[in-house]
Image: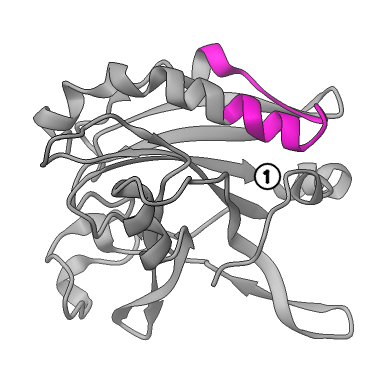
Amino acid sequence: MSDSRTLERLGEFEDHIRYALETYSSISDGRVAFDVAAAIELQPTPEAGYTASSKSPVSHLGDVAASLEVVVLGPIDGTGDNDTYNVLRTRHKGLPFAAKIIPVPKDCHTEVHLTLAAARTIGNNHEPVTFAGSVSQLGLNGNEVIRLARLGESTAEHMGSMHRQRGAVPIATIAVGYGGGTTGDERVRFGDPSALYNDWGHIQVFGRLTISHEAAKEHINMLRHLGVREPR
């Protein structure tokens, strides 16, 4: 559901998104390239639990290897939906009674969260802060919606960034993938299903980079080139 006050401010984020994506490309020494012109074309998403988004291709070593969705979360927006797990059949203590917090199954190999920008909605300084971002990743434990991790900045780091007490830096975090707990060739899947939830009172803009199972066979090194880290 698009938040009208957040929609009015979409244009403020264009330069910040552009700069952030160019910086991530530079971190990879140009091996990862974003379609910045398409990425900044944010469109309202009235049917979703978040305010706006854009979708664009991502290249790795010259080949299209992933997709990027730039997602705009207004205060208490979320990326969940009611399509697989019904909000009426789940427990979600301390979270809104809404489809936007319900975790979604993932059909990709890997999903990466990229901090892009955030902006306060109250106070004197509403200018977006490039690379600021901190969202709660929600998952399921039986029929209970639980908090899995915090993606992007820690709570303390994010508060510092938003109050201009520290300089925010680019942070790329694996949100969905295969990681710890490995035994032999077995890899433990994490973040599937999941949803991302903005539990702050301000606007957050982040990138959701997804790599398919097929593309991962040749391009999983994209994660290393972007300096991706595992969730906290």
8 w.r.t. 95: above or below: above
- Visible in this render: residue 108? no
Q: Is residue 26 magenta?
A: yes
Q: Which residues are magenta?
A: 21-37
Compare residues 12 and 5 and report the one nearer the observer: 12
Compare residues 203 and 167 and report the one nearer the observer: 167
Q: Quadrant of the C terminus?
A: bottom right
Q: Name the residue rendered at 15%, 60% in the picture.
A: 98
Q: Is residue 130 magenta?
A: no
Mark 1: few, some, or many residues within 10 Å (few <14, many ≥20)? many
Q: Which residue is situated farthest in the front direction here?
A: 165
Q: Quadrant of residue 209?
A: top right
Compare residues 232 and 179 and report the one nearer the observer: 232
Compare residues 148 and 18 and report the one nearer the observer: 18
99 w.r.t. 55: above or below: below
- The amino acid type, in three-letter code, at marker 1 is Ile
Q: Which residue is mark 1?
A: 211
Q: Name the residue rendered at 66%, 35% in the picture.
A: 24
Residue 120 x/y as whole percent: 21, 41
Tell me: 196 left or right of 39.
Answer: left
Residue 76 x/y as whole percent: 19, 53
Secondary element under disc 1, as helix, strand or loop, is: strand
Q: Name the residue rendered at 88%, 78% in the picture.
A: 185
Q: How is the image coloured?
A: one colour
How many numbered discs? 1
Q: Quadrant of residue 140?
A: bottom left
Tell me: 29 left or right of 155.
Answer: right
183 w.r.t. 219: above or below: below
Residue 134 x/y as whole percent: 39, 56
- Visible in this render: residue 45? yes
Q: Quadrant of the N terminus?
A: top left
